[in-house]
Image: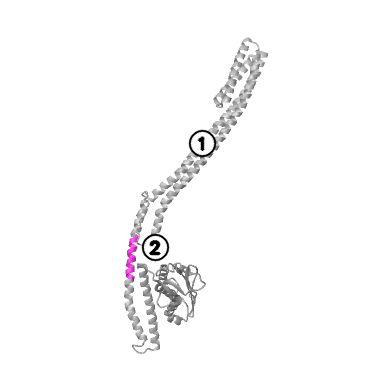
Amino acid sequence: MSIHYPSSFLKLLLIGFAFAIFPLLLAFANANIAFDKLAKQSEITIYNAVETTRAVRVLQEQINLMERSIRQYYVLQDDVLLKNYKQADTRFNSAIMQLQHLTTYRPLLGKINILHQQSQQLEQLIQNSTDTKTTQPEVLDTFSKLTQQIEVIIEENNQAIDSTSSQLTLSAKKTQRNLLIQSLVLIPLALLVAGCIAFLLARPIRRMDRAIKELGEGSYDQEISIDGPGNLRVLGQRLDWLRIELKELNEQKQQFLRHVSHELKTPLTAIREATELLNDGIGGSLTTQQAEITHILKDNTIRLQRMIENLLNYTKLESIQPKLNLQQVTLPDLINKVIHAHALSIRNKQLGIETIFNLVKIIADHEKLTIIMDNLISNAVQYSPDLGHIKICTGEDKNQFIIEVIDNGPGLEKADQKKLFDPFYRGTTLRKSLISGSGLGLAITKDLVATHGGNIKLANSVKGAHFIVTLPKMPDQ
């Protein structure tokens, strides 16, 4: 499925960041609005509760002052006392009006309205009594009713405060629950968006990483196409251009190696044949020193020929996929034949060869297995010191055959072990040969073992090199 990407990697990052943070911003905004609303509601509730309680206290104070003033007025008939009464009555009515304005609790509002009506009745009675200059018993009875009504209002006010507090608590819990639900929805949504953006970002990067890895492994056939932001697509086009250049260079290298190897074989064959003729005395008898020189020439032409053959085998393995010619192979015969091919070098170094054959017959490609063993034994002979020891073991376990080649040479540095099977890598270990190796033997060995579906590795050893080759068993073995 083709995905439409923005024109640049930065734009994709910004879009991804915006989409990922939007749900979080929405959750934050909702939380802020909810808490602000709850805070305002709490502020109003607390304010109303305080003002209502204060107004009720004023009612109590003023009703007491009113009753005391009017009683004293009836006794003393002093206008100052009547004036005090009227001032208290004004404050009393103001408190009632304030309560009516603040109260939203219907039962309490009804009690306040009744108090207001009783207050008006009292005012009318007081007016009548002051006009006639006589005491009316209904006045004192009305004061008693007002006092009782104020007590009822106090109780109702407390109930209203408790009710409002309960509603406020429920609102807080509801707000908390809503915010939790929003968080449970929006946070996973933000994570999902972030995951999608991460996928969109990682997809072209993974493709680039895979393309670079394929280039590093020498695979140049598959076209590189990066589906991503514009600048990454441009980078993919440049990688594809690099792939084409590397492919052409690799083909030129293969062609050069084939031509050079082929051209080297012709003069080398002539040199080897001439050395054989001299060594056989065709050109006349040789002195001891001359015989030693021709012997050195013969050994090194053989080694040089082997290096050229390795080079040809390597170019052949790179250019085509080798096919296996599977057959039954007798390992002792094959290994002994390879050892005999190196008999001269083994005899010159006075090497001890130990063979342990716990496995005799396997199914493999005889020619390729011979090359594998020849490269391993050749390396062991070449690196072993004079009077050294080489051990060759064969065995098997449940699913695979095992061949081991162990020498007591200088071994390999840790830095060399990582690149041991890389083509043309020779490492830092010093060699005692007159002609350096090509660095292809182990690379060819690894390719041929892999062709069999097996594996080769360098095992840990105190001294020397310890190679282990494992080949899978065929279904009928």
Residue 467 visible here = no
* Marked residue nearer the N-terminal end (1 or 2): 1
Please report the bounds of the magenta region as a residue range: 242-257
Closer to us: 424 or 179? 179
Q: Residue at x 39, y 50 (%)?
A: 10
Q: Reply yes or no: does residue 249 show up in magenta.
A: yes
**Residue 437 sits in which quadrant?**
bottom left
Closer to us: 56 or 62? 56
Q: Residue at x 58, y 33 (%)?
A: 166
**Looking at the picture, which amino acid does disc 1 mark?**
Asp
Please identify, in this view, whether the residue under mark 1 or under mark 2 is nearer the observer. Answer: 2
Q: Residue furthest front?
A: 476
Q: Which residue is mark 2?
A: 216
Q: Position of residue 189 (x, y in %)?
A: 46, 45
**The disc label shown at residue 36, or none:** 1
Estimate how packed mark 1 is, as few (under 14), some (14 to 19) or many (20 or more) residues with alpha carbons within 10 Å. few
